[in-house]
Image (cartoon, rainbow, N blue to C red):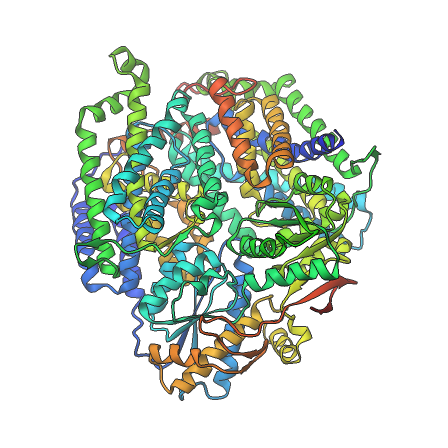
Amino acid sequence: MRIVFAAIVMLTLLVPITALGVGAQSATVKIGVPVPLSGGNAKMGDDIAKAARMAAEEMNAKGGVLKRKIEIVAFDDACDAQQAVTAAHKLIDAGVVAVAGGYCSGAAIPASAVYHDAGVAFVADASSNPKLTDQGFGNVFRVIGRDDQQGPYAAAFMMKKLMAKRIAIIHDNTVYAKGLADATKAALDGKPGVQVVFFDAVTPGEKDFSAVLTKVKSLNPDVTYYTGYYPEGGLIAKQFKELGVSGKFMAGDANNDPTFVSEAGTTSEGVFITSTPLPQDQSTAKAFVDRYKKRWNQDPGPYSALEYDAVGVVVDAIKRAKGTDRAAIVKAIMATKGYKGATGAISFDKKGDRTSVLYITYIIKGGKFVPYGAF
Amino acid sequence: MEIALQQMVNGLTVGAFYALIALGYTMVYGIIRLINFAHGDIYAVGAFFGLSVYGLLAFLHIENPVLTTLLALVVSMGCTGLLGVLLYRVAYRPLLHARLSILISAIGVSLTLEYGLFLIYSPSFLVYPHLFGRAGPSLGSIQISWLQAVIFVSSIVLMTALYLLVHRTKIGMAMRALAINQDAARLMGIDVNRVIGLTFFLGSTLAAFAGVLTGLYYSQISFLMGFLVGLKAFTAAVLGGIGNIPGAVLGGFLLGILEGLAAGYFSSRWKDVVAFGILIIILVVRPRGLLGERVVERM
Amino acid sequence: MKVPTGHSYSPYWVALTVAVVLVAIGLPFFGDAYLIDVGTLVLIYVMLGLGLNVVVGYAGLLDLGYAAFFAIGAYVTALLMVRYHLGFWVTLPVAAFTTALSGVIIGTPTLRMRSDYLAIVTLGFGEIVRIAATNLTFTGGPEGVYGIPHPTIGSLVLRSPRAMYFLGMAFALLVLAGSYNLARSRLGRAWLAIREDEAAAQAAGIYPVYFKLMAYVLGAVFAGAAGSFFAVKLTAINPSSFTFIQSVTILMVIILGGMGSLPGVILGAAVIVILPEALRAFDQVRMLAFGIGLIVLMLLRPQGLWPSRIGQIERRAVATSEASAAAGVSSDTPSTTG
């Protein structure tokens, strides 16, 4: 029995050592995809990983890159800072030439430091917190917009289109949601006649928001803007209507998912969502959505198209760099001009942010996201 | 004033859920001194089993909302109850006297249940059929839905039934005897294992009941839904006096109301701090909990 | 009733110790960055485990909010280094002092409670610290503190994984030495007395509350030290690293490894960190496998992987409950063994 125990323990100590026998000299071109594969965000991570795999498969069918096959190496970061750092080290040691992925900004930011130290390019598909690129690491890029772009857009929409004077903002104290909420509030503060009557956070994972919404109700807002994610977003929208809170309900781009509608049911009618244009509304993206559905037998997630483009950007950079040298790839990504992705044309500015990000507002009508108009 | 009353109604609804789950914690703790980390996940399992029943009935074209709901409740409670007993037999019984090891086993069970649901049902969340809306009587501008009333009333009924079971029946007497002194109970001819198993069964059925109602009321269930609620329910059980059945009920409702008031009048993002703060103050002042504890002395 | 004999010095365990030491020393030279990073993480959990071991293992207090002290140490170092540009070594005594003070503040009103109420109260404090860190702008809110500079020794900047590993090893060895000496000190003996029989200890003139507080505060300081190291290792910290789950993980380290035993804590830390990493290959099933693994491990070896004397008590207790379970099954015959 003791031998068994000793053996088990030795094994747990030694397995990782042997399991990592992957050297950098392999025949495939490896691209790292760190995403949450466990925990509450697992579905999002899975959608992102699937998009990356599909991108690689399509490109491999056309011969791959530099006459080698592309391999997607996906590791779980569990949306946790420490695990993201460990995953980053693991990806680097596995010999990835660049990294395209990430979901939680709170995990992406510490991990970006690791990628920076190793000189590996990190193209974020879903982390919209401004600080990711504000850090000034030259190797960090993102294909999604920044929260401090979406915030002012949402504020302008509320003030000018919805004529709102009293605005309530609810977030969930995650890096993303708070960042968007802060940016929105900053754009509303000081504007004449406009008042942010409520600014507070709910706890993600909870279901009952009636206490908060009752308080918001008592403040008679014209618009209530929820900047968190869709699991809570759908619930809040539903309870918002059920409690009879005045005014309109609006939500940020992490709610641009059909499950928001199925959750909120009929109460989702008339809800506004600020977002970058959804794949179905971009001619370039529609084809992507169809191919994704065919390949995986399910709808793509909100960030699948972005990840697809992130991988595409990386492969395009590899082609232009004519090699897999990590530093050369970073330079090539920086020089990306007008790469035609599923989400539109992609170029990066000096900080690594995507230039010319467009936000529009959707309204939910008949259970579908209908563009309300750009602004 | 009306806002305050509305918050009370909200709080009582949330509190009913906490109370139902707290009962399971308090009963199990009372007789075997285990903080059953997995109990919140039993609540989640109950919710998912209920959803399966709905799905099955829909497949069989049985549509009547009241009938399907009753079936979902009964089947889910039964199955989850049996699961509770099974978990006791497999993961806890061999470790009854190893106080800390049994805790780890409970954590293992919790993870197993969570990720079992993750793999079998969904990694994100599932939506319950929208059977009952929020229609209901309004007293002034206070909204109370029929569903809320049902939740509140049925919770009270179940808890009263449990109390009667424990205090007026022979098997209940066996449970109480076990809670006082396990060895003496055994000497009196009480089948300890059966009684403990029954305790797990009852606690799990109540949690399952809460789970299905959660699905109906909030519409959304996810594999991690038990974690946060479990934590709160355990807090409620301690607040009322661990091992004490009326205490768990009181603690549950009190916590629900406290949270609602804290979110409504103070600040939503600080409400858990307020709730825990009050809990700590109460325990410092009344170290045995609000209604006093009923715990086995030495195992 | 047979009690299994102890085996602390059997050749298998000696071989295991040698293997572990070899791996620990050889890792920074032969391992790649990922393995060294994993190794450093093990060292962090060793420190945390040793600290909690003082609280739970030596003094018998069930603490479910230990991550709070880890957080306080990390934030103190992070904030002082980023906002006030202080050097790492300067922040250490400040972190130690702050965590000790928190230990006193949290411990004084609560250590009188029964140990199981203490569990929920410490849990509450853990959550309060985490939520405060999330809500206050001063601590950086949910984003936390990032851009933490690397520690320097003279002109040498410690930034590579290997340097971090050595630094972590130094910290861990200090904490290990401290724990070892504590166990054998008068404090340690007082804790043993309280743990075995509090009433008797009191009768012998030991004030339980004072000694429990000492254990709690010392444990807090160890966690604070681990936190400071954690901050400079990650260079960015945020509240999600200090959740209740983190507290539970640290508790798992010492229970899995064997309560009260120093080699047990080290082994427990290794398993807790390495097992999920080794299971990465299982992808979706990883956490499920981990959960089942925990149950199986506890059923097979409830006293932990490398238990101390305390473990003997656990083992005897398990044998007892198994016997009584067997007796309980035959329901109609009143049993006089138990």
Among the 4 quarters of the image, the one containing residue A96: bottom left
Q: Residue at x 65, y 60 (%)?
A: A154
C314 lies above or below B125: above
Relative to A341, B105 lies left or right? left
- Residue placed most toward the observer, C77 or C48: C77
What percent of the width, then of the height, locates residue C11? 15, 46
Q: Is residue A184 visible?
A: yes
Compared across the picture, whether C36 is left or right of A196 comes to left
Question: Relative to A330, does residue C112 appear above or below in the rendering?
Answer: above
Residue beneath the point at 65% across and 71% down: A277
User: Which residue is situated farthest in the top direction here?
Assistant: C203
| Rendered-image quadrant of the N terminus of chain A | top left
Residue B123 at x, y = what percent?
56, 57
Q: Quadrant of residue B135?
A: top right
Task: Report whether residue C258 is seen.
Answer: no
Q: Position of residue A97 (x, y in %)?
A: 37, 76
- Screen quadrant of the C terminus of chain A: bottom right
Judging depth in this view, the residue of A326 and B207 nearest the camera is A326
Which corner quadrant of the image does residue B153 belong to?
A: top right
What's the residue at 63%, 51% (across, down)? Answer: A232
Question: Which is nearer the eye, C28 or C287?
Answer: C28
Left or right of A365, for residue C26: left
Give the total of numbered labels: 0
How far from the left and from the top, in percent, is residue A298?
A: 63, 68
